[in-house]
Amino acid sequence: MEQITTFFQPWLHNAAIERLLYIAIGIVAVLVVTGFLKRMVNTKIENTDHRYRVRKAVNFVGYLLILIILLIIYGDKLGNLGVALGLAGAGITFALQEVIVSFAGWLNIILSGTPSVGQRVKIGDAKGDIIDIGVMRTTIMEMGDWVEGDLYNGRIITLANSYVFKEKIHNYSAEYPFLWDEVKVPIRTESDHELARQVFTKVVNEICEDYAIKSEKGWKNMANKFRVEQANVRPTVRLKFDENWITFTLRYIVDYKSRGTTKDKIYTALLDEIAKHPTITIATSTSEVTSIVKPISQ
């Protein structure tokens, strides 16, 4: 026992070792407390968005406590530490430039509030819903690619937060969570185009009028914040014709999450209404493929 005590005696009175020991104890205590709090959050909070935000807040407080512990323990060494960091600053900046830019991007996201978790974005070639924003990376649940429409394909994308300064960010749901969408309906030139306009207007109004009413307030709020003109958010039906057929374009406002289902409802209602009116006939184009057989030369 005396031999063991003698072996550890120099370590017990070493100031550097004592500091590291205190740091280790402090970090373990912080991790235990934050882990316990996060488990409580998972069991007590049912709302997914609230649970995510509280977990993020717990993590942030944990990192802050660890930083405070380091500052308290090494408070008397900050002068020497500053000199050392100043000498190594140029090399660190060059070696970790992507990390530094990503951290700056995270600060930009936190301060500006956009993009945020839950928003639908397109960043470069990546399109989908943001499911997490970390200190260094943003995680996106991808949409599209081999899957048509606004549907998840199951692939998860992680982007370094430096994209804030390098890529265009197309946000589908930030200030104005509505989109304009269109449905084109071709009918034959001998169809009753006046009746067709009435029928198509009725269909798009019945399905999309609620979105238009809800979007008016959102557009006014955005017009107060940005330099945008007053837009017509009500459904419209426009006609165009050529020598082949008449084309009606149904333009309407829809919630960014409901674009696919709304278009399905409109198409279904259009088919039902067209079936009730024999004077309205859908136009189609046909093509014929023929093979040319060369005669056998004699």
Image (tube, rainbow, N blue to C red):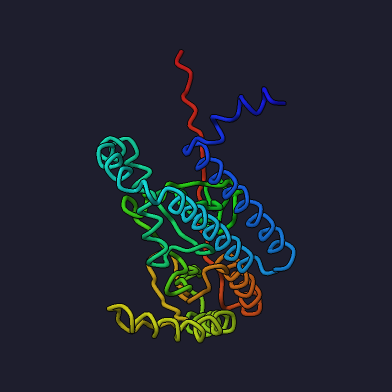
Q: Is residue 126 visible?
A: no
Q: Position of residue 91 (x, y in %)?
A: 28, 35
Residue 55 versus residue 230: which sits nearer the camera? 55
Picture quarter with the N terminus: top right
Q: Residue furthest front?
A: 2
Q: Residue furthest top?
A: 298
Count of all numbered marks drawn on residues in the image: 0
Q: Position of residue 129 (x, y in %)?
A: 53, 58
Residue 146 falls left or right of residue 106: right
Image height of 210 relative to 3, above or below: below
Q: Position of residue 277 (x, y in %)?
A: 62, 79
Residue 216 versus residue 277: which sits nearer the camera? 216
Q: Residue furthest right?
A: 43
Residue 62 falls left or right of residue 248: right
Residue 269 versus residue 298: which sits nearer the camera? 269
Image height of 67 relative to 14, above or below: below
Q: Residue at x 56, y 35 (%)?
A: 12
Q: Position of residue 207 (x, y in %)?
A: 59, 80
Image height of 110 relative to 272, above or below: above
Q: Is residue 187 visible?
A: yes
Q: Residue at x 33, y 43 (%)?
A: 81
Residue 244 versus residue 158: which sits nearer the camera? 158
